[in-house]
Amino acid sequence: MLRTLWVWIGIPLIMIGIASAIVIYSVNNPPDTIVARMLTYERIFRVIREHMGLLLVSMIGATIVGVAGGIMLSRPSLYRIGRVMETLVNIGQTVPSLAVLALFYTILGLGFRVAVFALFLYSILPILRNTFAGIDGVEHSIIEAARGMGMRPLRVLTKIELPIAFPIIVAGLRTAIVINVGAATLATFIGGGGLGDLIVTGLSVHRDMIIVNGAVIAAITAILLDYLIGKAEERVVRWS
């Protein structure tokens, strides 16, 4: 019990505590008036909320589309549609993240909406590929046995293929989240907000303390989310 509490609560609290200590120290001990004006609790909480909003909305969309695309690729009747989707997403993934944001800025304008859309496109590929790889890796004999028992294709997918492929799908989700947390810091260049505001502001005024706050919070966010999703995956696999 104690070990479980430590895994689920202790380690995340240490990570959050490190980030909180840096923020509290920086806000209460600014080296000059510029840092004091730029680093306030209100501003830090605001950029964290914006960053998490970008991450949450884009990842929900990317997960739905990525899993659906992976399923299409694994189905002969839908393979062509899935292949077209993979090609388009693959092209988007090869383009640098800042270029993707700039491209869609010219189409959708500035703000949260364009940042979410660009991050959504940038996060699909790992989920799509891992979903297809997980389903494609299911032993054909297992699928044939399920069909022999009278299970319909949809039931085979939901009861056999997806549960077996689950660890691989989650691995793709973890990769996408880490990519998304980093790429979301670039949303500041198109008015999307987020932790990138602190980093870019710190660079523009040459104040390391501001840069460190934005970078550390972003890094710990990525590590923490990856850690918690990994532990949740282990628990689900153990239960199943």
Image (cartoon, rainbow, N blue to C red):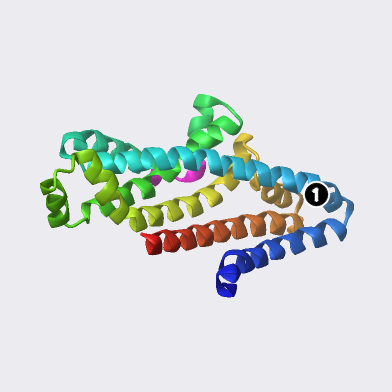
Q: Is residue 210 left or right of residue 79?
A: right
Q: Single out the residue that lies furthest toward the front.
A: 149
Q: Quadrant of residue 207?
A: bottom right
Q: Which residues are magenta?
A: 93-98
- Residue 164: give x, y in percent of width and height: 29, 56
- Residue 150: give x, y in percent of width and height: 14, 43
Q: Quadrant of the N terminus?
A: bottom right
Q: Tell me: residue 68, above or below residue 203.
A: above
Q: Tell me: residue 34, above or below residue 78.
A: below
Q: Which structural element holds mark 1?
A: helix
Q: Is residue 209 left or right of residue 123?
A: right
Q: Amino acid at mark 1?
A: Tyr
Residue appearing at x 70%, y 65% in the figure? 18
Q: Quadrant of residue 71?
A: top left
Residue appearing at x 25%, y 39% in the figure? 72
Q: Is residue 69 left or right of residue 18?
A: left
Q: Quadrant of the C terminus?
A: bottom left
Q: Main secondary structure of the magenta part?
A: helix
Q: Nearer the viewer, residue 49 or 101?
A: 49
Q: Is residue 89 within the magenta segment? A: no
Q: Single out the residue that lies furthest toward the bottom.
A: 3
Q: Single out the residue that lies furthest toward the right.
A: 33
Residue appearing at x 61%, y 31% in the figure? 111
Residue 95 visible somewhere in the drawing: no
- Residue 106: give x, y in percent of width and height: 52, 27
Residue ID for mark 1: 41
> How crowded is the residue under tag 1: few (<14 C-alpha within 10 Å), some, or many (20+)?
few
Q: Is residue 63 left or right of residue 165?
A: right
